[in-house]
């Protein structure tokens, strides 16, 4: 792991910017910088899985990455960035629930891992999920919730996907505080992810 | 009849107190902090609960009749008209912004900016009134306008109405059903004040890395404000614990928690305990890395609600002999499961974590709105079958321990203390104390009114 990836995975914000400013001044390829930042973010994900890091470090590293990208943006215009996209993932908080902390963490980590994320926001009705699956051909649909009255709303999305004849085309993963195996079974989803990193790993497996 | 209800009230409250204080009692209390199920059981929409106090009370009376085994009911802190009068931005309400049958939800934003820490630290109440309230309360956005003055006045009146509704409700439930409340009054851990309604989660977590000193200094001043707010709303008879919902601790590492969350939270809880109160703490999410700290507080004074993501068995093991724990019944099972599953779940809880007392039956900090009535009944029946410790014990409600003078609690930092007003009035012609008493009381109520909007 390079110096930049190391600094990022260690939450050394100022050091990250110093290295990048220096690399930019030296005319480094912005795609190489992004690659090294991704290595750093992967390390952050590993540290989270090991229980060394917590959500606070995920959020802080995502914030640092956001600033890095704003530094790189002017250099990226004209370059094709989407070459390494791993696959598309649709994500949204189901109807009735307006919470987005968990969904946003997952979306950030997915982007950091090279996925294209179609984020439908919060309080998303079933039809919107169906339309997104049709339009994007994404192989993964992620449903998020914080509140436990949303079980029927999740089930409704799964049923709507089936009714639209799309059930075989897409894997549905549910996640969020009130979700467990019993809820997965009730909703008819394919998987439930107990935390953000587990969800990302499932996506990697599905697209592998 | 009245005598029967008094006896029932004392029996329930005695059982609740004894379990909380780790003292002998007859059976495991059925005593969740928030019983959302009771509100909807008789068919009310969620909008009716927060907008129609009569219907709310009727629903609760019906619940008390049908489930007389339940030991405490619930408190509520959302009264729709008050939230409308001020246009409270931090909540979406059923029937107003959400379908009538959806639960109210909190809206998090960066209401306080990154460069405003010093303003908060140097003059907390001034910052609340001058800067934050106009952002949290839409009707106050245009400071100094007629509309904003009217909104403040309406808000004050609505607050008094709400207090009257709660008082009446408490009395009716006590006298007609012998039903005590699980808690009265509330506060937040200082870190949560920042991470909920002031800066929001993301910004506060990032501030913790970028400006740790400011975060700590802000938490420190918030100890005082939260302590005064909690004490002014608490049960004057000290029968009920003060409620604290914790929110953001679960996003922190143990080191971060020990540095940023716990010291000010502990200090605040010690002030309230010194004042003779107990605390009911909703430990949201998985607190397993943090809850051992509750052993540092006086025994039996902090009832810990263990959430669905927390492991009730581990919680009991870690806190046994220190604090009472509540929880264990799975929310998803009450909503989706069968009566047999619920019965088996509760039997197991009674015979393991519930065995030696210091345990209260509850789900993840609340009984969910959508619990199936037959599952709720199965839970209650299972407690009545398996939840007995010793039927001969008749625990009486406990008198509050004597209050000791807290060294940590400073006098409330009032915007217009009596001395200032007195100076303006000049010579007082009659009994000064008579005037002062009411001035102080109203000034203090107004400060509580201001600070409650951080929740």
Image: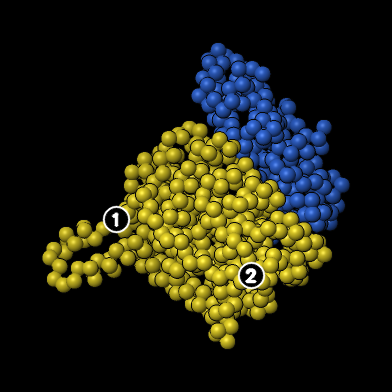
The residue closer to the viewer here, B257 or B39, is B257
Label 2's element? loop
Q: Nearer the viewer, mark 1 or mark 2?
A: 2
In this view, which residue lies farthest toward the top?
A26
From the viewer's perspective, is B51 left or right of B437? right
The residue closer to the viewer here, B356 or B184, is B356
Q: Chain B rendered in what hue?
A: yellow
Q: Are marks 1 and 2 on the same chain?
A: yes
Residue B52, image x and y in percent? 54, 75
Question: In which quadrant is the C terminus of chain A drawn?
Answer: top right
From the viewer's perspective, is B113 left or right of B428? right
Residue under label 2:
B393
For disc 2, the chain is B
Q: Who's blue, chain-wise?
A: A
Residue A6 in view here: yes
How far separated are the C-alphas under marks 1 and 2?
51 Å
In this view, which residue lies farthest toward the front?
B392
Label 1's element? loop
Dots 1, 2 in contact, CB < 8 A: no
Q: Earlier in the sequence, mark 1 or mark 2?
A: 2
Is A28 situated above or below B415? above
Residue B455, image x and y in percent? 49, 56
């Amino acid at each position: 792991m390079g110096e930049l990836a190391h600094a990022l995975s260690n939450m050394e914000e100022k050091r990250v910017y110093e290295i990048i400013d220096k690399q930019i001044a030296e005319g480094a390829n912005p795609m190489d910088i992004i690659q090294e930042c991704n290595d750093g973010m992967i390390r952050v994900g590993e540290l989270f899985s090991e229980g060394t890091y917590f959500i606070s470090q995920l959020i802080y590293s995502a914030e640092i990455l956001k600033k890095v990208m704003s530094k790189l943006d002017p250099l990226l215009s004209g370059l094709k960035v989407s070459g390494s996209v791993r696959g598309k993932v649709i994500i949204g908080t189901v109807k009735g629930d307006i919470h987005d902390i968990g969904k946003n963490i997952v979306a950030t980590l997915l982007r950091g891992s090279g996925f294209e994320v179609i984020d439908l926001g919060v309080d998303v009705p079933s039809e919107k999920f169906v339309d997104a699956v049709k339009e994007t051909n994404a192989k993964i649909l992620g449903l998020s919730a914080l509140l436990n009255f949303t079980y029927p709303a999740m089930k409704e999305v799964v049923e709507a996907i089936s009714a639209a004849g799309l059930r075989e085309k897409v894997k549905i993963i549910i996640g969020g505080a009130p979700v467990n195996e019993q809820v997965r079974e009730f909703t008819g989803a394919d998987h439930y992810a107990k935390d953000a990193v587990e969800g990302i790993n499932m996506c990697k497996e599905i697209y592998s | 009849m009245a005598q029967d209800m008094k006896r029932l009230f004392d029996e329930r409250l005695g059982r609740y107190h004894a379990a909380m204080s780790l003292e002998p009692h007859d059976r495991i209390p059925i005593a969740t902090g928030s019983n959302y199920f009771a509100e909807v059981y008789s068919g009310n929409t969620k909008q009716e609960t927060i907008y129609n106090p009569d219907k709310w009370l009727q629903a609760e009376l019906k619940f008390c009749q049908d489930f007389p085994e339940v030991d405490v009911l619930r408190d509520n802190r959302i009264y729709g008209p008050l939230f409308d009068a001020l246009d409270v931005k931090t909540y979406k309400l059923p029937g107003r912004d959400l379908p009538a049958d959806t639960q109210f939800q909190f809206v998090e934003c960066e209401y306080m900016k990154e460069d405003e820490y010093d303003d908060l630290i140097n003059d907390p109440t001034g910052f609340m009134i001058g800067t934050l309230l106009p952002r949290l309360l839409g009707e106050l956005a245009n400071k100094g306008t007629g509309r904003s003055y009217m909104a403040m006045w309406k808000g004050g009146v609505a607050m008094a109405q709400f207090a009257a509704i709660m008082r009446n409700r408490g009395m009716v439930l006590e006298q007609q059903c012998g039903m005590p409340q699980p808690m009265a009054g509330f506060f937040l851990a200082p870190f949560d004040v920042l991470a909920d309604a002031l800066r929001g989660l993301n910004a506060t977590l990032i501030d913790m890395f970028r400006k740790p000193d400011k975060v700590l200094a802000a938490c420190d001043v918030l100890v005082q404000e939260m302590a005064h707010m909690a004490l002014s709303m608490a049960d004057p008879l000290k029968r009920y614990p003060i409620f604290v919902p914790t929110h953001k601790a679960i996003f922190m590492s143990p080191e971060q928690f020990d540095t940023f969350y716990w010291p000010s939270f502990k200090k605040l809880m010690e002030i309230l305990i010194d004042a003779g109160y107990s605390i009911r703490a909703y430990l949201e999410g998985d607190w397993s890395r943090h809850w051992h700290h509750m052993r540092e507080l006086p025994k039996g004074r902090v009832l810990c609600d263990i959430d669905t993501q927390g492991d009730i068995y581990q919680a009991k093991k870690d806190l046994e002999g220190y604090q009472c724990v509540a929880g264990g019944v799975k929310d998803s099972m009450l909503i989706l499961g069968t009566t047999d599953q619920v019965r088996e779940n509760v039997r197991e809880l009674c015979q393991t974590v519930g065995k030696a007392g210091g345990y209260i039956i509850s789900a993840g900090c609340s009984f969910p709105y959508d619990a199936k009535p037959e599952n709720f009944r199965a839970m209650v029946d299972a407690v009545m079958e398996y939840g007995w410790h010793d039927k001969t014990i008749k625990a009486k409600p406990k008198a509050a321990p004597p209050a000791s003078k807290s060294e940590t609690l400073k006098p409330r930092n009032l915007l217009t203390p009596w001395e200032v007003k007195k100076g303006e009035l000049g010579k007082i012609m009659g009994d000064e104390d008579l005037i002062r008493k009411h001035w102080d009381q109203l000034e203090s109520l107004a400060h509580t009114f201001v600070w409650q909007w951080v929740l």
